[in-house]
Image (tube, rainbow, N blue to C red):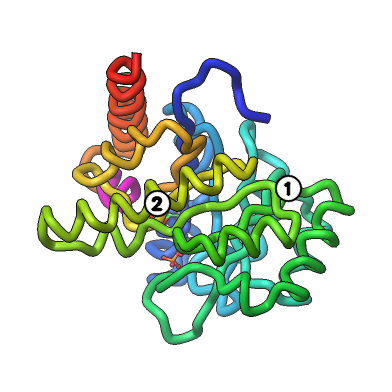
Amino acid sequence: MIPEHYPILLGVNIDHVATVRNARGVSYPDPVTAAALAEQAGADGITIHLREDRRHIRDRDVEMLADTLQTRMNLEMAVTDEMLAIACRIKPAYVCLVPEKREELTTEGGLDVAGQRDKIKAAVEQLAEAGIETSLFIDAQREQIDAALDCGAPIIEIHTGHYAEQQSEKTQQQALATLIDGIQYAHSAGLQVNAGHGLHYHNTAPIAAIPELVELNIGHAIIARAVLVGLDRAVRDMKALMVSARQQALMKQG
Ligand SMILES: CC(=O)[C@@H](O)[C@H](O)COP(=O)(O)O
Ligand SMILES: NCC(=O)COP(=O)(O)O
């Protein structure tokens, strides 16, 4: 449920707390503790990506977070039978279906929904039967947005990685224009539109200013800053930045 009158929501992705833990094979830092701290600092939801190779978040984390989260879980996962079974048992508020490659450093692109409509539609239906709202992590392409609508997904998350990778002002503006086109197209078709990937403290404001966006999911940059200033401050800084960008955009709109 989206809180009314709230300008924009922040889902904090805590995957990389688990990355640090797993690097030493110990039990700390615990992503479950990180989730509680992020919630206290104003996170509107907690995002976790249970990768098939379990390189960061593990099954135990998902189980414990399901018991302890005070906000809502957004479970990112590949479209596989194993993951669908886990989601239907855990029943997170949201599942975000994402593409996965074993060898990738991080998610490299959006899910090809147009190329596998039947499979995605069946997954969306199975999750809906379990009471879970499905989001599809896609690039801002009309073909993919149309396919998401065909599959009956109520939510999409637009992949902002390409925008985040741009090195010049000019190409970043071009990437931003592509995102805005896709976001407005999806919103006018009735989808809830979220966004995320690669967003950090210096590139998030123009994204947060897009009025059709409901939520941003941000992980790596927040956890990286938390190492230096603490998680509470890192979450509060990001949320303040997003809210301020959105409020300024709404004031300009009149
Ligand atoms: C799907 C997505 O954009 C995030 O979950 C991101 O993938 C974080 O996890 P990784 O760093 O493992 O890619
Ligand atoms: N879906 C995007 C996400 O959860 C966070 O991605 P990142 O900020 O870790 O790149």
Q: What percent of the width, then of the height, locates residue 153? A: 70, 54
Identify which residue is drawn at 55% across, 41% down.
Answer: 187
| Pointer 1 or 2: first along the chain | 1
Please say if the residues under marks 1 and 2 sit with CB atoms less than 8 Å apart: no
Identify which residue is drawn at 37% across, 36% down.
Answer: 210
- Residue picked out by circle 1: 133
**Quadrant where the C terminus is found in the figure:** top left
* Residue 53 magenta: no
**Quadrant where the N terminus is found in the figure:** top right
**Can residue 34 be seen here?**
no
Q: What percent of the width, then of the height, locates residue 104? A: 41, 80
Q: Quadrant of residue 67?
A: top right
Q: Which residues are magenta?
A: 221-226
On screen, residue 47 above or below 26? above
Q: Which mark is residue 219?
A: 2
Check disc 2: other Cα within 10 Å, few if <14, some if 14-19, many if 20+.
Answer: many
Q: Which mark is residue 48?
A: none
| Residue farthest right in this picture | 129
Using residue 191 as the reference point, say whether residue 197 is left or right of it: left
Identify which residue is drawn at 45% across, 59% down.
Answer: 140
> In front: 214, or 59?
214
Q: Amino acid at mark 2?
A: Gly
Q: Amino acid at mark 1?
A: Glu
Is the CB of mark 2 within 8 Å of ligand 2?
Answer: yes
> In front: 165, or 179?
179
Question: How far is the residue under mark 1 from the one under mark 2?
Answer: 21 Å
Q: What percent of the width, then of the height, locates residue 129? A: 89, 53
